């Protein structure tokens, strides 16, 4: 579970840093509600990503029926949680809806950006001896 | 009468919201569950890698969930937005937007889960290639989301475009047809793209030396597989933006509804079929470098033939819109 914690920390901190940076920029440019929405959406996106993994230990080592019920309830809780910032931005004019929506996908955007950076790294790196790698049957 | 329309608008918004999230949850749940099942298989075979495999599973599931978050956004917009004016066309709009997003998220949810599942197996068998496999998995999963993005765009256009001044009949049918064309049309492509990306992950793990050619053919195969979803989007846009003259007869409305249904349903099979063709080509190109050119040609020809039924659906839809 250490690696899961590490990846949550990595993507979570990157996402919030990005949101805070972009939010600050939007504040300065006068788009305050967009910035606020972006930060709000990002916070919920991070919480959802953390909750995705948090339930894993509780699902392991229990009966199949209990694990199914627990997983189903967990999904409802997570989706309910993601609905909160959208409802807030629809009701309160201080938060821009589209900023919030972009924020909700911040974790996914960070994951994809990380993937693209890795791809660039691998394509520019000297070709290593991949010929020697064997498929384990 | 206005009160009645307001009540029905509310009913349509609730039903549309329910359909968006209800249908939208199907694909992502299947995709995520399939990923978890393959991750279990990989962990059972190689428990020492459980940390890496959990990580890959989690990241892949986060991407696979994107389509259902799109559905959640549309559902929330339908449930909580205050629409300023009253129009019978808004009833059709809310239903169409909900249906479009809900149906459109099914294929991408399932499709995004396929490469992630295969990445777990690949990392277990070829741990040294985990970074490269993860990158291809992310690219494949993200591209498989594009049909759901088409559905999201169609839903948002439907919700935010002003249909005031257009005749109720046959515009109501054009609106519903647009939702069905884009939503149903996204199912096949989403699954098909996932099948191609799945083979890409497997191919890179099995034959790391051929990673570049496997990636290139995978991306080509996915691009061709996506075309039927684009047909759905095209028909949806024509139905939304074309001005149809007022018609007393129900036949004109049915022609437009039929056009949407024809394109939507007609795109499901070709999308999946093209995915099969791409999946097999990518799988064997990874194993047989010399056969790359022949296999790529064979894949493209196979996909073109599979796509022809989608083109028939497109032609019939266009006839229904412009001739019937």
Image: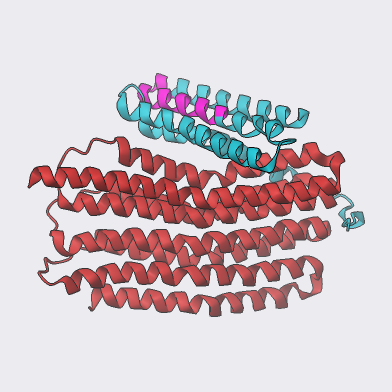
B208 or B114, nearer to the observer: B114
Q: Give the camera-side residue of B138 and A28.
A: B138
Residue B172 on the magenta segment: no
- Residue B300 appears at what percent x and percent y? 61, 75
- Which color scheme is applied? by chain
Residue A87 place in picture, x, y as percent? 37, 30
User: What is the x, y in percent for residue A80?
Assistant: 46, 32
Q: Is residue A32 magenta?
A: yes
- Quadrant in the rendering for residue B115: bottom right
Which residue is rendered at x = 40% and y = 40% of the image?
Answer: B73
Q: Is residue B182 above or below residue B63?
A: below
In the picture shown, does residue B118 fall above or below B226? Answer: above
Point 38% across, 35% down: residue: A98
**How many circles with numbers are drawn on the protein?**
0
- Residue A36 position (above or below residue A77): above
Q: Which chain is cyan?
A: A
Left or right: B51 as drawn, with respect to A52: right
Q: Is residue A83 left or right of residue A1?
A: left
Q: Main secondary structure of the magenta part?
A: helix
What residue do we see at 68% from left, 35% from top?
A59
How far across and down, in percent of the image, does residue A11 sit? Answer: 64, 30
Q: Is residue A13 left or right of residue A44?
A: right
Check the image and name the residue furthest to the right. A132
**Quarter placement of the C terminus of chain A:** bottom right
Residue interval drawn in magenta:
A26-47
| Viewer can see residue B11 | yes
Left or right of residue B113: residue A124: right
Asked whether residue B145 appears in the rendered view, the answer is no
Query: Any idea which chain is the red one in this picture?
Result: B
State the residue in front, A4 or B16. Answer: B16
């Amino acid at each position: 579970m250490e690696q899961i914690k590490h990846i949550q920390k990595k993507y979570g901190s990157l996402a919030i840093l990005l949101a805070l940076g972009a939010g600050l920029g939007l504040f300065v440019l006068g788009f305050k509600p967009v910035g606020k929405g972006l930060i709000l959406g990002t916070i919920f996106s991070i919480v959802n990503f953390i909750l995705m993994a948090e339930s894993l230990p509780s699902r392991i080592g229990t009966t199949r029926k209990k694990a199914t019920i627990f997983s189903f309830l967990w999904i409802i809780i997570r989706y309910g949680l993601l609905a909160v910032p959208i409802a807030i931005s629809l009701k309160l004019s201080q938060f821009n809806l589209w900023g919030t929506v972009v924020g909700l996908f911040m974790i996914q955007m960070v994951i994809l950006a990380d993937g693209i950076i890795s791809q660039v790294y691998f394509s520019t790196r000297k070709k290593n001896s991949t010929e020697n790698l064997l498929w384990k049957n | 009468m206005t009160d009645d329309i307001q009540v029905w608008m509310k009913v349509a918004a609730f039903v549309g919201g329910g359909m968006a999230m209800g249908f939208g949850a199907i694909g992502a749940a299947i995709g995520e569950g399939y990923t978890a099942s393959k991750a279990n298989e990989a962990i059972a075979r190689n428990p020492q890698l459980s940390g890496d495999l959990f990580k890959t599973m989690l990241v892949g599931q986060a991407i696979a969930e994107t389509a259902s978050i799109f559905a959640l956004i549309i559902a929330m917009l339908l449930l909580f937005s205050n629409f300023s004016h009253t129009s019978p066309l808004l009833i059709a709009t809310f239903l169409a937007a909900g249906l479009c997003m809900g149906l459109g998220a099914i294929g991408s949810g399932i499709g995004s889960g396929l490469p992630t599942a295969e990445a777990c197996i690949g990392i277990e068998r070829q741990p040294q290639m985990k970074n490269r496999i993860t990158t291809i998995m992310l690219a494949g999963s993200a591209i498989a989301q594009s049909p759901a993005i088409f559905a999201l765009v169609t839903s948002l256009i439907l919700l935010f475009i002003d249909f005031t001044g257009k005749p109720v009949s046959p515009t109501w049918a054009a609106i519903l047809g647009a939702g069905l064309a884009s939503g149903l049309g996204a199912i096949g492509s989403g699954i098909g793209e996932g099948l191609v990306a799945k083979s890409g992950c497997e191919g890179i793990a099995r034959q790391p030396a051929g990673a570049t050619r496997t990636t290139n053919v995978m991306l080509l195969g996915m691009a061709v597989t996506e075309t039927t979803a684009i047909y759905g989007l095209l028909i949806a846009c024509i139905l939304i933006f074309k001005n149809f003259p007022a018609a007393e007869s129900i036949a004109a409305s049915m022609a437009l509804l039929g056009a949407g249904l024809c394109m939507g349903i007609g795109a499901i099979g070709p999308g999946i079929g093209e995915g099969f063709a791409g999946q097999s080509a990518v799988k064997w190109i990874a194993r047989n470098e010399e056969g790359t050119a022949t296999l790529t040609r064979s894949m493209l020809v196979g996909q073109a033939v599979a796509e022809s039924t989608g083109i028939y659906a497109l032609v019939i839809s266009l006839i229904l819109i412009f001739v019937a």
